[in-house]
Amino acid sequence: MIEWLKNKAYWNLDELVTYLEREFGGIYKSKQSYYEIFDRAKISRNKNQKTNTKFDKELVKKKTE
């Protein structure tokens, strides 16, 4: 399971739940258990953004003037 996670380019909680249910026949009651699996695989469950979605060029320009 850890190797499966490490070989993926993108991680999704719902996909992990489905994988564990299909491969091992069970699911956890708590989402925290899935987060612990991500932690064991040394995978951050937070999404990174390439750009700041709240960035406002005009507001920055006003502040720097």
Image (cartoon, grey):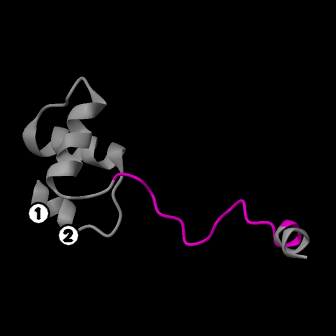
Query: Mark 1 and 2 residues: CB-CB less than 8 Å, in contact?
Result: yes
Q: Considering only vertical position in the picture, is 19 above or below 53?
A: above
Label placed on residue 3: 1
Residue type highlighted by circle 1: Glu
Q: Amino acid at mark 2?
A: Asn
Q: Looking at the picture, how far across and down is residue 7, in whole percent?
A: 20, 69
Magenta stretch: helix, strand or loop mostly: loop
19 w.r.t. 34: above or below = below
Give residue 44's position: percent from left, percent from top: 32, 56
Image quadrant holding the C terminus, namely bottom right
In this view, 30 is above or below 38: above
Residue occupying image coordinates x 86% and y 68%: 63
Q: Position of residue 25 (x, y in %)?
A: 11, 35
Residue at label 2? 7
Which stretch did the figure color magenta? Answer: 45-59
For disc 2, the neighbor class at 10 Å (few under 14, some 14 to 19, many from 20) is: few
From this view, report whether residue 18 is shown above or below residue 6.
Answer: above
- Identify the residue shown where x is 29% and y is 32%: 31
Crowd around label 1: few <14 · some 14–19 · many ≥20 (10 Å) = few
| Residue 52, image x, y percentages | 64, 66
